[in-house]
Amino acid sequence: MSPILILICFIIYTSLIFLISRLTVRRKAGNQAYFLGNRNSPWYVVAYGMIGASLSGVTFMSVPGLVKTEQFSYMVLVFGYLAGYLVIAKVLLPLYYRLNLTSIYAYLEQRFGYYSHKTGSFYFIISRLIGASFRMFLVVNVLQIFVFNAWGIPFWVTVSLFMLLILLYTFQGGIKTIVWTDTLQTTFMLTAVVVTIFIVGKELGMGFGEMIGEAGRRGYTSMIVTDLNDPRFFVKQFLAGMFITIVMTGLDQDMMQKNLSCRNLGDAQKNVLTFGGILIPVNLLFLMLGAVLWIYAGEVGLELANTSDDLFPTAALQYLGVAAGLTFFFGLVSAAYSSADGTLTALTTIFCLDFLGLQKKPGMTEERIRRVRYRVHIAFALVVMMVIIGYGFINDEALISKLFTIAGYTYGPLLGLFTFGLYTRRQVHDRWVPLVALLSPALSYLLSVNSEWLLGGYRFGFEILIVNGLFTFLGLVLLQKKTAP
């Protein structure tokens, strides 16, 4: 692919993003537009846009590559997602709307106190800085290897450029802009998958039905793993999917901020349930893409330089022609933007409201809040940029994977805190809550790495999140006050 052609396509896509930003913020946006989109976002637009935000670059590249070793077992996790969205729609969203929350962690202050509130907010910031930066690193690193290295552009310049562009189009509009830019990003990501499947089918001389049949004959479509000790055991997968959704959507400011921008609770519930239902065929598409790419790789002798994550970019950019390459490029750039824009807005919101308390401070006018928000927004853009560049210097896939796993552990304390708050009426000694939130992930990690000899060969998968939340819950039980609830 010609570097000039790639540059032109990048400019066109970025121009579309800025056009949407311009249309959604026709004049200087207020703070409520930034934080909650003036609670005026159409639910169906939010639902569609959240597809791209939830998939990110990890799904875009990793899920197709997993098919060779894990087949379609990932779908059991996705079915668990749907159960999690039911909990969000029926339990969490009514709570958030009833309390009229902007930051969802403000609930913890109302329920337990100051330290619980700050603990929840802190864990979200750490989770998002590690997780979202890692997702963006994966995407930008592929673009760097396959595209920008050819121009001699250093990695830190590529990262800085992306963060500058994201900063510019989210600077004023915040969530009001992101709700609409997410729709564009979702469209390009899904288009990339569908078009690539069509192109691969044409190369193989197969129709869609024939590709499904061939994938089945090769064993790629197998979903159910019945080995109890396997991390992909179907019961563990389903429960893990359910709880991953509850914490990484229902207890995540980035995802919930979009839901809270809907006009009312009913619209927000329709958004979540519709979004959850759409994710099933969307993830099936990604798995089907992986199956046909592995079939194609076997036919043409495609060899991967590193890991299975390279399957999609290698096939699209080096084997399938210009159309597939451009389609992949647009999808990948969409994934890069969607990994960072919502995160940047959510981090700014949490820091401004939960740590600086801007809406509670006396004498804070709309203009003063806006000025502080601008500075915080820029500061977080710089922090995210430095973390992504840091991943590039580490250059160790095993260590980076561990960092990403650590980010997953930080959601356990949020699960325990919200569960205890919702399903008990007891108060706790608030000042000791941060200690419980530190010990729970540590104990979960120790249990996970030693589970095979402690539990007779049992290996934890994603369900370690549930154990983490349980440790936090039990810790809060020990901290509960003896006085009447």
Image (tube, rainbow, N blue to C red):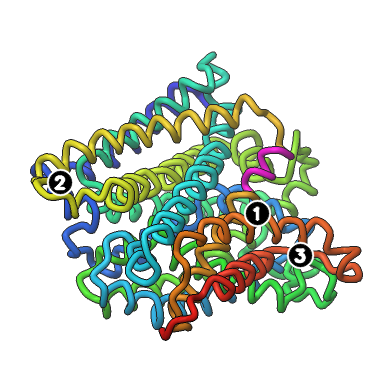
Q: Please indicate whether residue 166 sits to the left or right of residue 399 in the image.
A: left
Residue at x 34%, y 32% (from the top left corner): 379
State which tag comes first along the sequence, 2 or 3: 2
Residue 283 position in % (x across, y down): 56, 64
Amino acid type shown at disc 3: Phe
Q: Is residue 478 above or below residue 175?
A: below
Q: Which residue matches tag 2?
A: 25
Location of residue 316 (image quadrant):
top right
- Quadrant in which the N terminus appears: top right
Residue 330 position in % (x across, y down): 45, 41
Residue at x 33%, y 46% (from the top left corner): 351
Range of the magenta residues?
398-404
Q: Please indicate whether residue 179 sits to the left or right of residue 384 in the image.
A: left
Q: Which residue matches tag 1?
A: 64
Provide the secondary structure element on which disc 1 rests.
Answer: helix
Residue at x 57%, y 53% (from the top left corner): 59
Residue at x 51%, y 33% (from the top left corner): 387
Q: Out of 299 and 174, give the one closest to the viewer.
A: 174
Provide the secondary structure element on which disc 3 rests.
Answer: loop
Amino acid type shown at disc 2: Val
Residue 26 position in % (x across, y down): 10, 45
Residue 334 is a magenta residue: no
Judged from this view, the residue extending furthest toward the bottom is: 484
Check residue 460 in the rendering and tell me which mark sits there, or answer none: 3
Give the mark toward the camera: 1 or 2.
2
Q: Main secondary structure of the magenta part?
A: helix
Marks 1 and 3, how far apart at CA: 23 Å
Q: Is residue 99 above or below residue 147?
A: below
